Amino acid sequence: MNDFDIPGSQSTPSVHSNFAQGRLSMQGDSYPENSFEFFTNIIAWIENFLAQETTPLTLELGLIYMNTSSVKAMMDIFDLLEEAHQAGRAVRVDWGYDPQNERVRELAEEFREDYTFPFEITAHA
């Protein structure tokens, strides 16, 4: 599986993957014009990792703003992680946020309520 390094833009987060380390990172705002198109390769990368590897997968998030379609895409990603977790796979989410932005913390907490895999929410100084 190929890793990718997608630079962020005004409306899309930067996305970095590392198959060997089992890490996927997304940082920034997410309100792309076409969320389905933007997230398709990300979801495929996660599906392939979970199908091909047995090592842990960590999703590192630093998302600031997400539109409705990005929230839906993240729910799809979290559903994949939950399914893997229920099957005994080690998966986790580490979501960092600016303590000045409580809205992001609240969004992350709303997501965390729906899943049983490890989901850390940490304020970055």
Image (tube, rainbow, N blue to C red):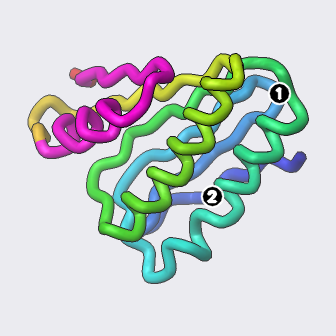
Query: For this rendering, which residue is in front, 20 or 9?
Result: 20
Residue extending farthest front: 86
Q: What's under tag 2, amino acid-wise?
A: Ile
Residue 113 in picture, x, y percent from top left: 30, 31
- Please tell me in which quadrant of the rendered image residue 98 appears: top left
User: Which residue is at a point 37% across and 20% down the rendered structure image?
Assistant: 120
Can residue 10 be seen here? The reply is no
Q: What element carries label 1?
A: loop
C-alpha distance separating marks 2 and 1: 18 Å
Q: Mark 2 points at which residue?
A: 6
Which residue is rendered at x = 62% and y = 25% of the image? Answer: 86
Q: Does the magenta stretch include residue 69?
A: no
- Quadrant in the rendering for residue 119: top left
Image: 115 above or below 32: above
How far across and down, in percent of the image, does residue 13 sit?
A: 46, 57
Q: Is residue 102 in view? A: yes
Find numbered disc 2 in the image and state the secondary structure of the residue it sits on: strand
Q: Quadrant of the C terminus?
A: top left
Inspect the image, locate mark 1, and give the three-letter code of the amino acid beneath it.
Ala
Q: Judge left or right: residue 59 versus residue 20.
A: left
Q: Is residue 114 magenta?
A: yes
Residue at screen point 59% across, 63% down: 39
Region rendered in magenta: 103-123
Q: Position of residue 8 (x, y in %)?
A: 49, 60
Indicate the position of residue 41 as horizontal and vertical percent values: 71, 61
Locate residue 83 relative to residue 4 in the image: left or right: left
What label does residue 20 carry, if any?
1
